[in-house]
Image: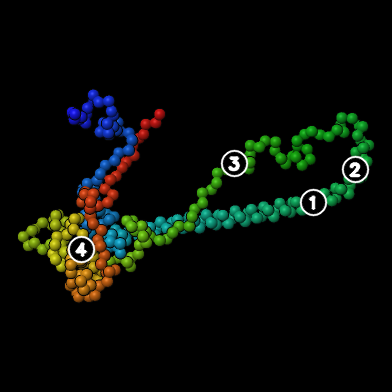
Amino acid sequence: MTRHGKNCTAGMVYTYQERKKDARQSGYGTDQIRTSKDSVKDFDCCCLTLQPCRDPVITPDGYLYDKEAILEYIITKKNEFSRKMKQYEKEKRQEELEMEELAAAEQRSRLRRFEGQESSIISKLGAAAGAAATTATAGAGPSGDASVSNMTADKARKLPSFWIPSLTPAAKKSVIKKPDKTVLCPMSGRPLRVKDFIAVVFTPVCDPHDKTALISKRNRFMCRVTHDILGNTVPAAVLRPTGDVVTMECVEKLIRKDMRHPVTGELLTEADIIPLQMGGTGFAGTNDQLSTSGARPVMQV
């Protein structure tokens, strides 16, 4: 059996490769692509700025931020909450005024109904006297007939046309919910508080012969204890008491044996060991959510 090429035009089947190729060339449909290492941040970069941190801090969930960037983010969210709260209070005051107006209108309608009932009692008393006069003028001719006009008596207050604003349908007002003042972490979605931040201390690689700037180096930081080079492929953790960054191998082989800080000798707990969220490697076995898709124009029949 012969092999079929991707661009084979003699086949009877519209293959998957041909369909993908035509979709890319047409510019329609959903475009899917798998991100590479250059599309994700390094382990020592801020989750907001995607740049190396100058003053790194870490959350209890292990996400690294630049202190200036995360504080600016928190201030922005609080200002947004203040703006939404003012708008919410304004709408609530307007709703209260509308309810007061409706209550006043209901009171006026009750008063009119009461006045109408009182006036009907007086009209019934004079109905007998008016009946004789009506009978006497019944044979006076066409001028004594009942009027067919829609503007007589109390009908003058009702317009014959129903195309008036009070009778036309109106759209319902959008209800603004009370905003939540809790600031959420942009990565984990959990509540974010400044007092939970932990200052991170990276140990730079000591190479007296390398004169390259720290930001330009490929291997910038190392483990505080074992001096292993840190990277996106090396799982690391932050020790809460001092903020030192160590490898997970050091945690498993050295720290978990007696649960003491390898530098200061301080007793540690499981909460004091915060796994650092790894950077991107481009390999599906190491990172999650490396696929992305974008919607393009769709041809409709």
Q: Earlier in the sequence, mark 4 or mark 1?
A: 1
Element under label 4?
helix
- The answer to whether 106 appears left or right of 115 in the picture is left
In this rendering, the answer to whether 187 lies above or below 137 is below
Nearest the viewer among 39 and 211 is 39
Q: Is residue 124 visible?
A: yes
Q: Which mark is residue 248?
A: 4
Q: Earlier in the sequence, mark 4 or mark 3?
A: 3
Q: Quadrant of the C terminus?
A: top left
Closer to the camera: disc 4 or disc 3?
4
Element under label 2?
helix
| Residue found at x 55% / y 46% | 172
Tell me the residue that label 3 is attached to: 169
- The answer to whether 28 appears left or right of 181 in the picture is left
Residue 232 rendering spot, x and y as whole percentages: 19, 55
Tell me the residue that label 1 is attached to: 117
The colour scheme is rainbow
Report if the CB atoms under discs 3 and 1 are less than 8 Å apart. no
Residue 189 rendering spot, x and y as whole percentages: 36, 57
Nearest the viewer among 135 and 224 is 224
Whole-number angstrom distance, CA of label 3 to CA of label 2? 44 Å
| Residue found at x 45% / y 57% | 179
Q: Which mark is residue 130?
A: 2
The disc labelled 3 sits on which kind of residue?
A: Pro
Q: Earlier in the sequence, mark 4 or mark 2?
A: 2
Whole-number angstrom distance, CA of label 4 to CA of label 1? 88 Å
Q: Quadrant of the N terminus?
A: top left
Residue 99 rendering spot, x and y as whole percentages: 61, 55
- The answer to whether 86 appears left or right of 36 in the picture is right
Residue 40 rendering spot, x and y as whole percentages: 24, 50
